[in-house]
Image (spheres, rainbow, N blue to C red):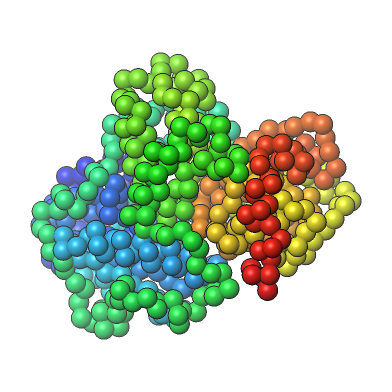
């Protein structure tokens, strides 16, 4: 097979990025799928692409799912959520393909593993993900993988490389989505891509590899014990993995969706709770969309002919369903678009010009209160609602939807400078939140400083023209009494000693 040859591919070309378009090693043992961001066996375009290659070459498929221990903010919380997913993937894979889970026991121990596996591979397929350390990891891997190497985007309903344009407003992205969504809804991933694998074989890596890099014993309950990761961030109550994600989705659709419009910002939280599962790739946004379609008894012919960026009426579904789809498609994928086209997405300089200008004009305004990093992390401010939000983040790895916005705004008010406030929010969120380190995490944090927003009046101290929020206004939006009962000061000693 020459360098220009392709498999008979069922994956849209817009989702495939050819990192190393060299000739296929036709005499190799297997096709390798390096699972990094879309950690699931279903509705996964990257896995589907690897199956296409395996079928075209008549080779078995080997799936590597590895977890290093030196990524920033590595902790028992984040590791356990991924390990839950590994266990689910091992069960779902069964004997249809080779599944090789690897947990790095010490910093640097996993170095060289991908190269050794790729030396025996005809083609290497991996996940494309525009955020955190994964783009750098792919750039580094490209230097060591000497065979055909592809990255496949299975992040959202729209491929993030479908346009070169960076969208700075939700209405503009929504208008773009409405014009092209029908095309992409007709090219959905196979629900069970491994069912299409012609050569079903639980192939294993060569002994030279498994001797140096032993597969993780996922049946063990003590996998976290000796790992050099942050033990002060405990395992969260939520369980990771596709099985758990499917249960969360089914509960949302059957019990919460109908109340989504009215209740998602109250303490009676009607949000989907899918964000961590989407972040780690344990469930696909295509599967989420499919579940909404089924409960709404909807088909693509019902799309509105009016495509002007309207928030309601485009899908011709119920009001709660349309509100939810606006979150999971418009707002979620707006974040993926931004991070994929703006390499400085995590820097202060990526804020809109108007936002930086107004923040800098008020950078020297007097701060009524200022708190240290430790006071913020330990929820020791003078604001009971903010403290409750921080305790929820530390306890559960998540935060109430509406209070999250106040949480970010108050740190801006309490920090010596906007730059410091931004650094603090990124650290706290990425350390504790299960859905941190994601394009949408950065969207939410930077929204507090003006990204995807507009200038607001009246101009205020510290905030300037940035949208203003207070704890008093929050009390009018949500049931703060029950929120404070759940995450109040009585939790302080058990959390922080």
The percent coordinates of residue 416 (x first, y second) are 81, 57
Q: Is residue 318 left or right of residue 389?
A: left
Q: Quadrant of residue 102?
A: bottom left
The one of 394 and 258 positioned closer to us in this rendering: 258
Q: Is residue 460 above or below residue 28?
A: above
Q: Is residue 69 left or right of residue 446?
A: left
Q: Quadrant of the C terminus?
A: bottom right
- Kindly identify the residue that appears in the image at 80 percent across and 56 percent down: 382
Q: Is residue 194 left or right of residue 387?
A: left
The one of 372 and 121 positioned closer to us in this rendering: 372
The percent coordinates of residue 121 (x first, y second) are 21, 65
- Kindly identify the residue that appears in the image at 38 percent across and 67 percent down: 83
**Taking the image as drawn, is residue 237 in sight?**
yes
Count of marks placed on residues: 0
Q: Is residue 325 above or below residue 227?
A: above
The percent coordinates of residue 235 (x first, y second) are 50, 67
- Kindly identify the residue that appears in the image at 50 percent across and 63 percent down: 236
Q: Quadrant of the N terminus?
A: bottom left
**Taking the image as drawn, is residue 111 in sight?**
no
The one of 497 and 179 positioned closer to us in this rendering: 497
- Residue furthest to the top: 305
- Kindly identify the residue that appears in the image at 50 percent across and 23 percent down: 312
The one of 265 and 327 positioned closer to us in this rendering: 265
The percent coordinates of residue 48 (x first, y second) are 24, 49
């Amino acid at each position: 097979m020459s360098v220009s040859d392709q498999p008979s591919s069922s994956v849209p070309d817009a989702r495939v990025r050819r990192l190393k378009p060299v000739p296929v090693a036709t005499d190799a043992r297997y096709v390798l799928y390096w699972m990094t961001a879309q950690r699931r066996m279903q509705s996964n375009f990257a896995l589907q692409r690897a199956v296409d290659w395996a079928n075209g070459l008549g080779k078995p498929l080997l799936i590597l799912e590895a977890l290093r221990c030196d990524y920033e903010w590595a902790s028992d919380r984040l590791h356990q959520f991924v390990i839950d997913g590994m266990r689910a993937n091992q069960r779902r894979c069964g004997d249809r393909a080779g599944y090789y889970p690897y947990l790095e026991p010490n910093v640097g121990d996993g170095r060289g593993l991908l190269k050794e596996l790729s030396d025996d591979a005809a083609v290497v397929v991996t996940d494309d993900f525009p955020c955190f350390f994964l783009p750098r990891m792919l750039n580094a891997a490209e230097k060591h993988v000497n065979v055909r190497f592809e990255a496949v985007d299975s992040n959202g309903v729209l491929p993030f490389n479908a346009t070169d344009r960076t969208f700075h407003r939700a209405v503009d992205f929504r208008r773009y989505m409405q014009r092209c969504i029908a095309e992409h809804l007709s090219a959905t991933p196979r629900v069970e891509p491994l069912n299409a694998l012609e050569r079903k074989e639980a192939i294993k890596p060569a002994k030279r590899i498994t001797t140096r890099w032993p597969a993780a014993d996922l049946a063990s309950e003590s996998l976290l014990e000796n790992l050099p990761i942050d033990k002060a961030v405990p395992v969260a109550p939520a369980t990771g993995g596709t099985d758990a994600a499917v249960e969360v989705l089914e509960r949302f659709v059957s019990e919460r969706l109908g109340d989504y419009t009215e209740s998602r910002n109250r303490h009676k939280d009607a949000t989907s709770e899918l964000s961590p599962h989407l972040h780690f790739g344990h469930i696909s946004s295509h599967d989420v969309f499919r579940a909404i379609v089924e409960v709404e008894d909807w088909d693509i012919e019902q799309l509105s002919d009016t495509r002007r960026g309207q928030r309601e009426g485009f899908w011709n579904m119920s009001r709660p369903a349309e509100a939810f789809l606006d979150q999971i498609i418009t707002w979620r994928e707006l974040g993926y678009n931004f991070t994929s086209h703006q390499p400085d997405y995590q820097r202060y300089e990526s804020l809109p010009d108007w936002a930086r200008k107004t923040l800098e004009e008020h950078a020297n305004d007097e701060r009524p209160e200022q708190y240290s990093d430790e006071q913020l992390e330990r929820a020791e401010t003078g604001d009971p609602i903010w403290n409750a939000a921080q305790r929820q983040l530390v306890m559960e790895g998540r935060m109430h939807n509406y209070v999250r916005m106040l949480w970010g705004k108050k740190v801006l008010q309490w920090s010596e400078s906007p730059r410091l406030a931004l650094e603090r929010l990124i650290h706290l969120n990425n350390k504790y939140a299960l859905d941190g380190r994601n394009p949408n995490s950065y969207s939410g944090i930077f929204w507090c400083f003006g990204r995807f927003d507009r200038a607001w009046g009246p101009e205020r101290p510290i905030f300037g023209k940035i949208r203003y929020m207070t704890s008093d206004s929050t009390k009018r939006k949500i049931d703060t009494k029950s929120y404070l009962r759940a995450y109040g000061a009585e939790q302080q000693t058990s959390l922080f000693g």
